């Protein structure tokens, strides 16, 4: 796994498409029980090199009911985006994740983690890539039907503060999905070997 992570962090395959020098961001361990697959690092994460080190990460940790110490314990969680580097900004926010990363790196990382019990698919890009034709017609419908993807996957919206309006319109997410998510995750964190 160390060689694989070093190879990922040294990757510069799509550097001509990036606004900054490539800085692939990932946290992984062969012991991880939960995989969080997001979109792509934002500018703050590009600068810090720490996955989910921004307001979206604060919201995600709140959803999961965990503090930074647990969240950044690579023996518990793998944090892997669809695109490993900050893609730059477009007209309505960050650009989509670069398409090169997931096909090149995801399978080798996942094959290195035999302890994984749950994969959180955060946002449309991760859901489309992993659920394929099982995705519903909208992200809202996919998340609303989360039970159809358990126990392997649990789809979530992106935790960006920009999605607060979506959360207000879809109160079922906070009332039903988040308590279910936390009830699934808690037993996965209860081993005392970390």
Image: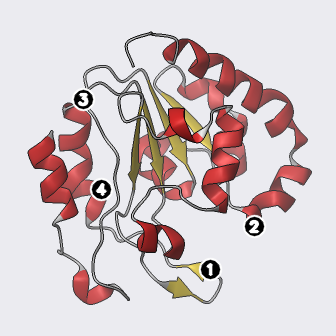
Among numbered discs 4 and 3, the one appearing first in the sequence: 3
The residue beneath circle 3 is 30
Q: Secondary structure at mark 1?
A: strand
The residue beneath circle 4 is 102
Distance between mark 3 and mark 1 Cα atoms = 34 Å
Of labels 3 and 1, the one closer to you = 3
On screen, residue 123 above or below 44 = above
Do the numbered discs 4 and 3 sit on residues whose CB atoms are within 8 Å? Answer: no
Which of the 4 image quarters holds residue 113? top left
> Local crowd at mark 3 within 10 Å, few (<14), some, or many (≥20)?
many
Do the numbered discs 2 and 1 sit on residues whose CB atoms are within 8 Å? Answer: yes
Which of the 4 image quarters holds residue 15? bottom left
Q: Secondary structure at mark 2?
A: helix
Residue 138 in view (yes/no): no
Relative image position of residue 52 (x, y in whole percent): 52, 55
Which residue is pictured at 73% across the width and 37% down the height?
144
Of labels 2 and 3, the one closer to you = 3
Distance between mark 2 and mark 1 Cα atoms = 10 Å
Among numbered discs 2 and 1, the one appearing first in the sequence: 1
Q: Is residue 157 left or right of residue 98?
A: right
The residue beneath circle 2 is 162
Relative image position of residue 81 (x, y in whole percent): 41, 55
């Amino acid at each position: 796994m160390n060689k694989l992570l070093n190879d990922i962090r040294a990757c510069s395959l799509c550097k001509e498409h990036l606004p900054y020098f490539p800085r692939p961001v990932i946290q992984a361990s062969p012991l991880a029980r939960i995989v969080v697959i997001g979109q792509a690092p934002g500018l703050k994460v590009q600068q810090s090199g720490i996955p989910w080190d921004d307001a979206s990460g604060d919201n995600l940790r709140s959803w999961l009911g965990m503090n930074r110490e647990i969240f950044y314990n690579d023996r518990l969680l793998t944090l892997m985006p669809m695109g490993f580097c900050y893609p730059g900004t477009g007209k309505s926010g960050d650009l989509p994740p670069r398409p090169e990363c997931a096909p090149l790196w995801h399978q080798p990382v996942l094959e290195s983690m035999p302890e994984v019990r749950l994969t959180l698919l955060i946002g449309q890009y991760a859901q489309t890539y992993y659920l394929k034709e099982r995705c519903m017609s909208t992200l809202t419908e996919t998340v609303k039907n989360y039970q159809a993807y358990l126990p392997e996957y649990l789809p979530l919206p992106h935790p960006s503060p920009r999605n607060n309006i979506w959360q207000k319109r879809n109160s079922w997410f906070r009332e039903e999905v988040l308590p279910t998510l936390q009830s699934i995750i808690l037993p996965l964190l209860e081993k005392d070997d970390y």
